[in-house]
Each structure stands twice: as structure tokens, then as C-alpha cells.
Amino acid sequence: MSKEFDAEDYEVEEKALLIPVEWLSKEARFKIIETLISTRSLVDLARNLGVTPTAVRKYLKRDTHPSDEVIRRALAIMEPYEEEKIYTIIIQDILSALKMLYESLDETYRNRIQKMIKENILQ
């Protein structure tokens, strides 16, 4: 189930570039790879990610985590039926990090963050 790139895929690839993969935790990266391997062979996934099958095995064993570039490629090759699960992984991970930051701040900064969220996200 190898995904070949054509003109339509450029939009998907551009969308993948807009997601701040640098912010993703190792755990989220592992979950993204696990989602992709559930519908592909190890060799196909490795080829599409531009890594060796050994690298994919290491991701699955959690011996090493996928790089930013590998995660960008993962987002570019995900199929439409995988989008909801992968986007949910990303959103939950970023929200979890934001919550940890929020809870570590005093009341003054918490109020500032609430205001920033309202102005920039909930507008």
C-alpha cells in the first residue's frame, strides 16, 4: 500500500509543513509511527519515510524516536482514513504540554495565557 506522490499530494505535503512537529513529544512520534505501521508493511513504511526497516523497528521498540523530518514525511504520506487519529495524537500532545506549562505558572501568568488563548485561538 505504497503511496506515490502526484500533483494532489503537494497540498497534503504543504499542510504537513505547517504542523509544528518540532513541538511533538517522543511519545506522540511513536504513536504516529504505530498508526502508520498498522496498515502498511514495515518495508513499505520505511521506504515512504526515507529510512531503513531497521530504523522503523527501532521506532516501534522505542529504542530511538523519529526525527522531525521523518514525522513530516509521515504526515505527508498518511491516508485520509488515518488523518483523524494522527491529528488527535498531535492535538492531545500539544494541549498536554500547554496544560503542564499553565499549571506550572502563578496566577498572573495563568491569566495572561487565558487571555492569549482567547485572543489568538478562540477568536
Image: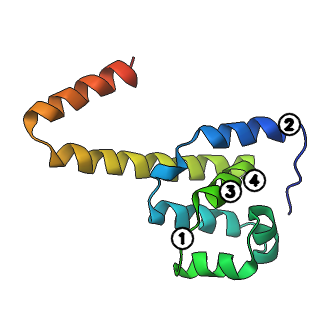
Query: What sort of colour scheme is used for the picture?
Result: rainbow
Observer-nearest of 60 and 70: 70
| Left or right: 34 as drawn, with respect to 26 | right
Q: Which residue is painted at 80% across and 76% down in the image?
A: 43
Q: Position of residue 109 (x, y in %)?
A: 15, 34
| Left or right: 94 as drawn, with respect to 22 | left
Disc 2 on helix, strand or loop? loop
Give the Cα separation between the discs numbered 2 and 3: 16 Å
Q: Which residue is mark 1?
A: 65
| Left or right: 60 as drawn, with respect to 27 | right
- What is the quadrant of residue 58 in the picture? bottom right
* Dot in front, 1 or 4: 1
Q: Which mark is residue 77?
A: 4
Q: Which residue is mark 2?
A: 8
Give, as a three-letter code, the residue at label 1: His
Q: Earlier in the sequence, mark 2 or mark 3?
A: 2
Q: Does the residue at mark 3 contact the one at mark 4 (Cβ under 8 Å)? A: yes
Give the Cα separation between the discs numbered 1 and 4: 18 Å
Relative to residue 113, is residue 56 depicted above or below? below
Give, as a three-letter code, the residue at label 2: Glu
- What is the quadrant of residue 8 in the picture? top right
Q: Earlier in the sequence, mark 1 or mark 4?
A: 1
Q: Earlier in the sequence, mark 1 or mark 3?
A: 1
Q: Earlier in the sequence, mark 4 or mark 2?
A: 2
Disc 3 on helix, strand or loop? helix
Q: Does the residue at mark 2 contact the one at mark 1 (Cβ under 8 Å)? A: no
Q: Which residue is painted at 70% across and 82% down in the image?
A: 54
Relative to residue 122, is residue 49 depicted above or below? below
